[in-house]
Image: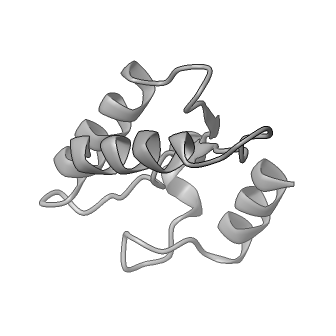
Amino acid sequence: YKRLLSYLSTTLKKFDGSSPLFTLATLTPTSREYQAPFVESLNDRLLKSASPRFPVGIRLDEMPLELLSPDGLHPNGEGYDFLAAVVA
């Protein structure tokens, strides 16, 4: 994560005039017990480190768990509709 922010900061310094627009997205939730703590921790770090330069503009973590497919990781049909509405 720190390497990514460092890379983005370094890359932004190379632009003259206008800067590119960056927006970060949280990960979708998971009901898999062994993955949920990692996903929640990463989303928490993203939200706490958000800034005007690197905003978290897409909140995929707000997708209800009921919209996951039986594998507990990927969205079902309604879940993809939810994500499309968030991103649009």
Q: Residue furthest left?
A: 34
Whether residue 29 sits left or right of residue 20 in the image: it is left
| Rendered location of residue 60, percent (x, y) | 58, 48
> As rendered, which of 25 and 68 lies closer to the eye?
25
Looking at the image, residue 84 lies above or below residue 52: below
Foreground residue, 25 or 6? 6
Q: Nearer the viewer, residue 77 or 9?
A: 9
Residue 2, located in which quarter of the rendered image? top left
Q: Where is 11 relative to 83, above or below? A: above
- Seen at 31% across and 31% down, the residue is 45
Residue 63 in view (yes/no) = no
Vertically, is 27 above or below 10?
below
Q: Position of residue 5 (x, y in %)?
A: 36, 41
| Left or right: 61, with 38 as reference point | right
Q: Is residue 66 left or right of residue 70?
A: right
Q: Residue 54: image x %, image y %?
A: 55, 32
Q: Residue at x 61, y 75 (%)?
A: 76
Where residue 3 sits in the image (x, y, percent)?
24, 49
**In the rendered view of the protein, which quadrant contains the C terminus?**
bottom right
